Each structure stands twice: as C-alpha cells, then as structure tokens.
Image: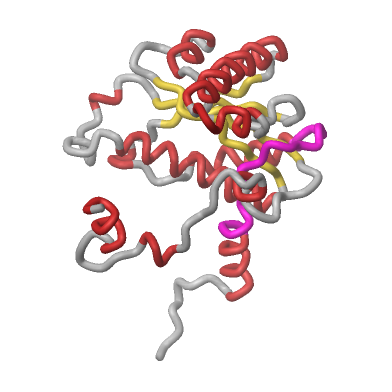
C-alpha cells in the first residue's frame, strides 16, 4: 500500500491526539500573565475554524478592564446561585464546585454570535443552529491550540446572555455564548474536573456509537 502523501508524520499526529486527549476545562490558574504572542496565536487558531457557508459568526471581546471583569464575575455568581437552587438535592454539592477562574486567569475572552445571522441561509435553512456549531468549533480550535501551548482554558457558561450582552453593549440579535478564562496553570487536571470531584462520569465511546439506527440501549431506556 502506498503511503498517504497528506498524512502528518507520526510525531505530528501524536501531538494532535495528545492535545485532544489532555485538553481540560480549567478553573485553577497560576495568576501569571499570558505572552501576547501566544494569545494572538490562539485567536488565529480560533479564526481558522470551519463555519457553515463561511459566515464566520464568531465575535471575540477581550476583557481588559478590571472593574468590568468583576461585574462579569457578578453575573456568573448570580447564575451559580440560581443553578444551585434549581438542583434541589445536589445544591450543596454543586456550590462546592469551582465554576470559573476569573480570580486568577490572565485573560478573559467573551465569545459571541454575531448579529444579523438570519441573512445567512447557506447551510442554515433547516439547521439554523449551525451558527452556534461554528462558534463551538472556533472555541475548540482555541482550546486545543492552548493545550499545545501549555496554557489553560476554562469555558464558563453560567451567565444570563441578555445581561452580559447589555453589559458589553452588544447589538440586538447578537448573543454571548461563552466566557473563556485563559492563562498559565500550575498543572493540568489528570482527569476532567467534574470526574475528579465526583460530580459525573464520562461515558465510553461504545455507549454512544451505533450503526444504521438509534442505539439499542437508549431505545430500551425509553420503553422502561
């Protein structure tokens, strides 16, 4: 068999798979600054993500104002308390979790969907949520690049998008979808933090993979 001329070298492939395997949603940061050149590379990696119809719906807002960062933390704290209330029996357990790292991360980046997305029909006529899928790809690009750089990233989703949009003077029709905490870390978690803290366990691939029809296990659970 002829070798694939487009395949990366074994060492390069190992690096890609290692970044995927060791990526973590970080909440603990060292407090050290982030090299500006690294931040530029991470943003460029995000911007190179695939997007349906090449609409590039992502918008990045770098938060450099200390008071503004604290106000954003306040919005996250409000939603943390509301989420805890909604969890009922697991309220106390949830409140023990660290849900954001804005206290020590070097950079805070708000990632948002652009406004006027309804103008983009290509690839979105029956699946309008593909704009969000495209933004998620951009975030994942940044995340994997950061892991390769030895930099931590934490995706914070505990906030009211409308309240954050008002705070950042975002236009009507746009929507904040992520607050990213970025910066050097003392170490990466050996396993996802929610597994380490006993909150949840990840399912194996075999439980989520099927052929030609919906997984039998899910069908059986629906019938019981």
Colour scheme shown: secondary structure
Asked if 212 appears above or below 34 in the picture, the reply is: below
Q: Which of these two is toward me, 186 or 84?
A: 84
Q: Residue at x 29, y 54 (%)?
A: 221
In the picture, measured across the screen, residue 127 lies left or right of residue 37, that is: left
Asked if 101 appears above or below 206 in the picture, the reply is: above
Query: Residue 27 colored magenta?
Result: yes
In the picture, measured across the screen, residue 208 lies left or right of residue 120, that is: right
Res. 111 visible in picture: no
Q: Which of these two is toward me, 211 or 84?
A: 84
Q: Residue at x 76, y 29 (%)?
A: 104
Query: Residue 80 colored magenta?
Result: no
Asked if 119 appears above or below 46 in the picture, the reply is: above
User: Could you tell me what secondary structure mostly forms the magenta stretch?
Assistant: loop
Q: Can you say which quadrant of the picture contains the N terminus? A: bottom left
Q: Percent x, y for residue 155?
A: 57, 35
Q: Percent x, y for residue 74?
A: 62, 14
Outermost left residue: 126
Q: Which of these two is toward me, 17 or 62?
A: 17
Q: Residue at x 73, y 37 (%)?
A: 28
Res. 96 visible in picture: yes
What segment carries the magenta color? 19-35
Q: Percent x, y for residue 219?
A: 24, 57
């Amino acid at each position: 068999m002829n070798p694939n001329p487009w395949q990366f070298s074994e060492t390069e492939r190992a690096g890609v798979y290692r970044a995927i395997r060791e990526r973590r949603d970080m909440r603990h940061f060292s407090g050290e600054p982030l090299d500006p050149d690294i931040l530029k590379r991470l943003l460029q990696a995000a911007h190179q993500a695939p997007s349906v119809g090449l609409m590039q719906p992502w918008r990045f807002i770098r938060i450099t104002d200390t008071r503004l960062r604290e106000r954003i933390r306040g919005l996250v704290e409000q939603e943390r308390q509301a989420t805890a209330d909604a969890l009922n029996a697991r309220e106390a357990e949830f409140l023990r979790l660290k849900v954001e790292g804005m206290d020590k991360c070097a950079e805070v980046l708000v990632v948002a969907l652009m406004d006027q997305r309804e103008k983009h029909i290509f690839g979105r006529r029956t699946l309008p949520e593909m704009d969000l899928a495209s933004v998620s790809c951009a975030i994942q690009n940044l995340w994997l690049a950061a892991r390769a750089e030895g930099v931590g990233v934490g995706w914070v989703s505990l906030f009211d998008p409308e309240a954050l949009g008002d705070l950042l003077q975002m236009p009507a029709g746009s929507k904040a979808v992520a607050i990213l905490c970025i910066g050097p870390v003392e170490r990466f978690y050996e396993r996802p933090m929610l597994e380490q803290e006993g909150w949840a366990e990840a399912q194996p691939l075999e439980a989520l993979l099927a052929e030609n029809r919906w997984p039998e296990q899910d069908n059986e659970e629906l019938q019981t």
